[in-house]
Image (cartoon, rainbow, N blue to C red):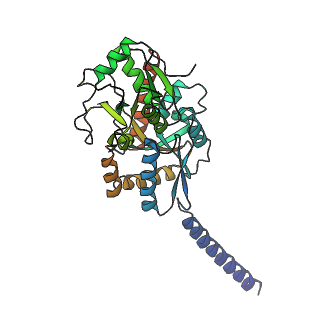
Amino acid sequence: MVHIQHTKRTAVAAALLMVSGICATAMAADKAYPSRPVTIIVPFAAGGSTDIQARMVAKSLQTVTGQPFVVENKAGASGSIGARAAASAKADGYTLLFGTTSTASETVLNKEAGFDIRTDFTPISMITNVPFMVVVSCTSGIKTPADLVRRAKEAPGKLNYASWGYGSTGNIMGEMFKLATKTDMTHVPYKGESPAAISVISGETDLAFVSPVQLPQVKAGKLCPIAITGGKRMNALPDVPKLEEAGVQDVHMPMWSGLMVPAKTSTDVVDTLSHALDKALKSEELVKTANGMSLEIIGSSPTAFKDQINGDIQTVTKLSQKTKLRED
């Protein structure tokens, strides 16, 4: 009798363990990443290039994963405020950073940035390569880079160029231009690309280096592009020359956007995001939208993205030794 009771207890225990295991497996399946909305922090103001790109990618990722990807703008301090928020978030894959070249440069240029892109983040993938336009107000009388250089040399320090903060892409391009043309212009930082562009339209500043997101302002005749940075002309502006074609050399740096997660995020989550993003970037709708904005969709492995970041940091470090890329 004792043996029979023991056998029954053993059988019951085994059954309970089996049920428990099945439940645990079911619960784990239910919580397969992502199982709830994911936040993408954009460290710049709404309406700018980075914000618009992030929203395109968020929409495509939602289609791929079935979960909402929600963009949250945390602008200020050349993107450091948003990057800090993302770096300090729980490393569970539910808070991502939509970073840019500016995010990498802040690591070098801002001692109070509060983050290091090399150690506080794990790269997922580069997303776009962005050509930039040199734009002026259409009422300025400046028609070519030669006009701009001549006016800058006639009144050293009088012309102002706008950017979205020290160490931002706009700032880096502006300082490269000054070095290449041996001119002196004053840097005026704003909290985002759109405010910087508006400052040129209103006459608060004289020029800016902006992304194709500002093409509607160009089409409306409010901003006039006088040159394009990068290795080729923009499809949307075939008659606007590259800076090199206009006689200005050495004003170029890869201007990327990319997705990253807080360091210590699990390999499983990183791999899941990498695969999902690879599919998202092949979306016909996303590619069509990007092409319409003259944005090149590139995509990359996490390793290739990491190499790009390290290379850009070296470039910015060298540039910062020659010119001003940080606030005093």
- Front residue of 275/245: it is 245
Q: Nearer the viewer, residue 99 or 144?
A: 144
- Identify the image quadrant of the N terminus: bottom right
* Residue 19 located left or right of residue 125: right
Q: Residue furthest bottom?
A: 1
Please indicate, yes or no, whether residue 249 appears anywhere in the rendered image.
no
Q: Report x, y in % for residue 222.
A: 37, 37
Q: Is residue 170 left or right of residue 38?
A: left
Quarter of the image that includes the C terminus? top right
Q: Nearer the viewer, residue 259 or 28?
A: 259
Q: How many labels sit on residues?
A: 0
**Residue for point 45% across, 48% down:** 54
Q: Is residue 103 visible?
A: yes
Query: Residue 165 location, x and y as percent?
Result: 51, 30
Q: Is residue 302 above or below residue 158?
A: below
Residue 94, position as x, y percentages in the image: 56, 53
Vertical arrangement, residue 212 with respect to residue 7, above or below = above
Residue at coordinates 45% horizontally, 42% vertically from top-left?
50
Identify the residue at horizontal 55%, vertical 32% (top origin). 116
Give the quarter of the image for residue 80. Answer: top right
Residue occupying the far right of the picture: 2
Res 202 quadrant in image: top left
Q: Position of residue 236 (x, y in %)?
A: 27, 42
Q: Is residue 113 above or below residue 327?
A: below
